[in-house]
Image (cartoon, rainbow, N blue to C red):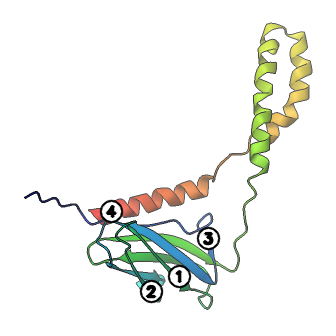
């Protein structure tokens, strides 16, 4: 007879947009390594860990996923913590509840990325001769300045992800 055991694990999928969630119905999901039908208790906590909204979800044993929808249309805007707990493991995620979430425009960033490749070949001839250096540098300075925007999610999302990872690590200990 072989017996194997593993520590209970529970996680929350990031349901925010840059750390923000719009008022209304919010779908929250995550994963767990618990058996099929395990109940996950989901709570939205305000200041002093007051429960603002709550719901339950069941773990789908074949996929290890759970999901529920919480109505936060009547909840005031502010900073909240979503906590998921199944009596063996827990996870939490902090978010900002706002009236509406602005959708970030990330399409200009990819079109600017190829223009960053163009200055690279012009830099090679500029190293060879000093007179042609001034002409291409003047022509390429404008695209180089516009391509300095950071592609991806940005610093705020990276910090939120870091904080969430730290919270999960602390909760496991």
Tell me which label, 1 or 4, sits earlier in the chain.
Answer: 1
Instruction: Determine crowd level at label 4: few under 14, some 14-19, many 20+ residues with C-alpha closer than 10 A.
Output: few
Identity of the residue drawn at 44% across and 88% down: 51
Which residue matches tag 2? 55
Residue 111 percent location from the top left of the image: 79, 43
Tell me which label, 4 or 2, sits earlier in the chain.
Answer: 2
Most foreground residue, 171 or 49: 171
- Vertical order, 114 against 163 (above or below): above
Tell me which label, 3 or 4, sits earlier in the chain.
Answer: 3
**For residue 106, side relative to residue 143 (left or right):** left
Identity of the residue drawn at 81% across and 13% down: 125
**For residue 121, side relative to residue 76 (left or right):** right
Which dot, 2 or 3, sits closer to the camera? 2
Q: Would you say residue 147 is visible in this rendering?
A: no
Separation of disc 4 and disc 2 at Cα?
24 Å
Tell me which label, 2 or 3, sits earlier in the chain.
Answer: 3
Disc 1 and disc 4 in contact, CB within 8 angstroms: no
Which dot, 1 or 4, sits closer to the camera? 1
Which residue matches tag 4? 170
Which residue matches tag 1? 69
Separation of disc 1 and disc 4 at Cα?
27 Å
Residue 157 percent location from the top left of the image: 58, 58
Number of the label disc, if any, that sits on residue 20: 3
């Amino acid at each position: 007879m072989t017996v194997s055991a593993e520590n209970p694990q529970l996680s929350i999928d990031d349901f925010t947009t840059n750390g923000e969630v719009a008022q209304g119905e919010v779908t929250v999901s995550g994963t767990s390594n618990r058996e099929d039908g395990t109940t996950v208790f989901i709570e939205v906590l305000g200041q002093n860990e007051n429960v603002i909204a709550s719901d339950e979800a069941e773990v789908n044993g074949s996929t290890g996923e759970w999901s529920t929808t919480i109505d936060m249309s009547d909840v005031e805007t502010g900073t909240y913590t979503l906590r998921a707990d199944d009596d063996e493991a827990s996870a939490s995620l902090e978010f900002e509840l706002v009236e509406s979430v602005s959708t970030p425009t990330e399409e200009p960033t990819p079109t600017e990325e190829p223009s960053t490749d163009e200055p690279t070949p012009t830099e090679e001839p500029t190293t060879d001769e000093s007179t042609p250096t001034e002409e291409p540098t003047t022509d390429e300075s404008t695209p180089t300045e516009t391509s300095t925007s950071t592609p991806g999610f940005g610093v705020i999302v990276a910090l939120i992800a870091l904080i969430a990872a730290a919270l999960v690590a602390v909760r496991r200990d």
